[in-house]
Image: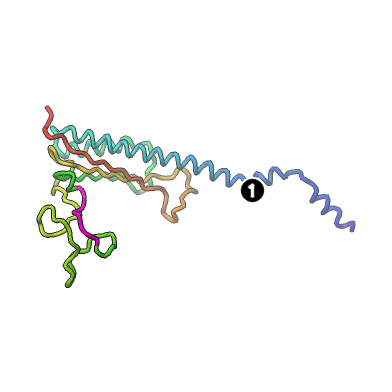
């Protein structure tokens, strides 16, 4: 009985309980705070990328007096300048692709009937003649889209799609929840514009 007295005194002693509670709750609080900051950072990066792509696309479509190479370079530089304030995942880079089309309808796949319901077009195979489709350009094959060959930002009156991807790094390394190698989030933004129909002087 006498040996149990120190244990009873220890169980009744509440000194230091706040420190123990804080030690248990601190990791959760830190994770919540850092996660909120990181989420806000990624949201701002996404908004910046979306705005930069839209602005660069508008600028490129309105300056037909410059060559395609010059307009493409200016567009890439403008987007890169906006995204310079955000951390890139090491070893990766900003990627911007511009694809020109004759009109808006050619930026999307030719219409087809998905007879087997698999969500994609199935072409001829063996005795199967392929799923029925609307041959917009009359070339006898189904086309996913009809880009202009050897063209990036297009000429006067062309429709151009701009697609950018930016692998942004997490602010806090312990938030890499995507597994090994997942050091950030790949952001995507796109814009579709029609170039000015004539060159401005």
- Residue 4 in picture, x, y percent from top left: 85, 56
The residue at 67%/46% (across/down) is: 21
Residue farthest to the top, as pictured: 201
Residue ranking furthest to the left: 138
Q: Magenta part mainly helix, strand or loop?
A: loop
Q: Find residue 144 and report its horizontal and vertical position in percent.
A: 20, 54
User: Which image quadrant is residue 194 in?
Assistant: top left
For the residue pair 138 and 156, the one nearer the viewer reads as: 138
**Image x and y of residue 160, in percent:** 19, 42
- Asked if 134 appears above or below 88 in the picture, the reply is below
Q: Is residue 123 magenta?
A: no
What residue is drawn where x is 28% and y is 62%? 117
Quadrant in which residue 161 is drawn: top left
Q: Residue at x 14, y 47 (%)?
A: 148
The residue at the far bottom in this view is: 127
- Structure colour scheme: rainbow
Name the element at disc 1.
Answer: helix
Q: Quick one: quadrant of the C terminus? A: top left
Q: Quadrant of the N terminus?
A: bottom right
Residue 155 in picture, x, y percent from top left: 13, 39
> In the drawing, does residue 83 fall left or right of residue 19?
left
Magenta-span inclusion, residue 109: yes
- Give the magenta part as a residue range: 107-114
Q: Which residue is mark 1?
A: 24
């Amino acid at each position: 009985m006498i040996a149990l007295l120190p244990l009873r005194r220890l169980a009744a002693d509440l000194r230091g309980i706040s420190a123990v509670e804080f030690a248990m709750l601190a990791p959760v609080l830190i994770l919540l705070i850092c996660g909120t900051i990181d989420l806000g950072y990624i949201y701002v990066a996404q908004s910046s990328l979306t705005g930069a792509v839209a602005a660069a696309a508008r600028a490129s479509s309105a300056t037909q007096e410059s060559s395609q190479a010059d307009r493409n370079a200016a567009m890439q530089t403008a987007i890169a300048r906006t995204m310079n304030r955000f951390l890139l995942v090491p070893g990766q880079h900003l990627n911007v692709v511009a694809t020109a089309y004759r009109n808006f309808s050619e930026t999307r796949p030719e219409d087809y009937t998905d007879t087997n319901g698999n969500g994609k077009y199935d072409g001829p195979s063996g005795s199967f003649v392929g799923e029925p489709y609307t041959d917009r350009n009359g070339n006898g094959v189904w086309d996913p889209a009809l880009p202009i060959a050897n063209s990036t930002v297009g000429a006067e009156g062309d429709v151009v799609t701009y697609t950018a991807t930016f692998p942004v790094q997490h602010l806090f390394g312990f938030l890499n929840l995507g597994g090994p190698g997942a050091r950030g989030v790949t952001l995507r933004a796109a814009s579709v514009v029609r170039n000015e129909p004539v060159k401005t002087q």
